[in-house]
């Protein structure tokens, strides 16, 4: 059993803190059952036991993530375990019509392209503002620096790349960053102005990130795929993104924006 757990942790692609969380869950599972998980039914029984202990939703979410990842690694059907309810705070978000209104409220290609990229990539303002011209892959990726300094390629559909292309056509100057000298506060005020023009009084730029996550869920994506799109590595985040998959071609998995 220990060897099987070690093999699993060695062969999967995951951050060290994620592997530690998986090891903790699976070790406790073995203590209870005497063996590694063998079915989704058994795993759900274990989750029900953990819930009966009154554990926090985030802790239960970690358990679900670990069990799903292990069952998939073993080739055992999970039988919709990823849909198990984990009650967490619901983020505020815009519907697709409101996002169209927000785009219509933009007075320049600067704010318009920023709205599009924040929504399409599910990114933070700082991540988009720090993109350099050399960080653009016109096949549909932007090399971003995530919170904490981690760098990776963010997936963007043709819709978002189209807005970026229109901005690049009129952009002036030779600054290495796509948005030049603009700072967070500059972009924040531009987007708030667009929201007021669109009649969206409670808007904050971060709502675009939440909106993308919610819309992808409505489109039928699993939480792990959504979490990968948004660049999450922490399994205890406010929305129940469970874990990164072993291998995913986001261009095949994540549907393009259609507004």
Image (cartoon, rainbow, N blue to C red):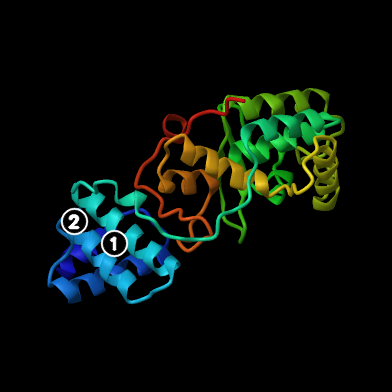
Give residue 142's position: percent from left, percent from top: 61, 38
Label placed on residue 133: none
Chain-order first, disc 2 or disc 1: 1
Instruction: Give left or right: position of 210 versus 8.
Output: right
The C terminus lies in quadrant: top right
What residue sits 22% from the left and 70% below the top?
29
Q: SS class of the residue under badge 2?
A: helix
The residues tagged by marks 2 and 1 sit, at their Cα atoms, a distance apart of: 22 Å
Q: Is residue 147 above or below residue 204?
A: below
Q: How many marks?
A: 2
Crowd around label 1: few <14 · some 14–19 · many ≥20 (10 Å)? some
Label placed on residue 41: 2
Observer-side mark, 2 or 1, equals 2
Quadrant assignment, res 198: top right
Q: Is residue 232 above or below residue 154?
A: below
Give residue 55's position: percent from left, percent from top: 39, 74
Q: Tell whether label 1 touches label 2 (CB within 8 Å).
A: no
Q: Front-most of 172 and 240? A: 240
Give the residue pinned by disc 1. Answer: 9
Q: Is residue 133 visible?
A: no
Instruction: Give left or right: position of 221 versus 123.
Output: left
């Amino acid at each position: 059993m220990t060897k099987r757990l070690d093999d699993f942790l060695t062969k999967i692609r995951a951050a060290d803190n994620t592997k530690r969380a998986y090891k903790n869950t699976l070790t406790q599972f073995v203590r209870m059952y005497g063996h590694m998980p063998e079915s989704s039914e058994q795993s759900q029984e274990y989750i029900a036991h953990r819930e009966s202990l009154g554990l926090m939703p985030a802790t239960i979410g970690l358990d679900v993530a670990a069990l799903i990842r292990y069952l998939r690694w073993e080739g055992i059907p999970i039988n919709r375990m990823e849909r198990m309810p984990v009650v967490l705070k619901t983020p505020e978000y815009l519907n697709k019509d409101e996002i169209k209104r927000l785009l219509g409220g933009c007075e320049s290609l600067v704010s318009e392209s920023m709205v599009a990229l924040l929504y399409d990539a599910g990114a933070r303002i700082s991540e988009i503002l720090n993109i350099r011209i050399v960080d653009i892959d016109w096949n549909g990726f932007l090399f971003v620096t995530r919170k904490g300094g981690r760098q990776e390629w963010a997936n963007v559909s043709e819709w978002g790349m189209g807005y970026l292309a229109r901005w690049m056509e009129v952009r002036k100057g030779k600054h290495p960053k796509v948005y030049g000298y603009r700072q967070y506060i500059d972009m924040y005020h531009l987007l708030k102005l667009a929201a007021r023009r669109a009649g969206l009084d409670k808007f904050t730029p971060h709502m675009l990130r939440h909106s993308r996550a919610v819309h992808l869920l409505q489109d039928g994506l699993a939480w792990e795929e959504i979490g990968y799109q948004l660049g999450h590595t922490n399994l205890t985040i406010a929305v129940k993104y469970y874990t990164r998959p072993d291998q995913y071609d986001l261009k095949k998995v994540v549907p393009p924006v259609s507004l």
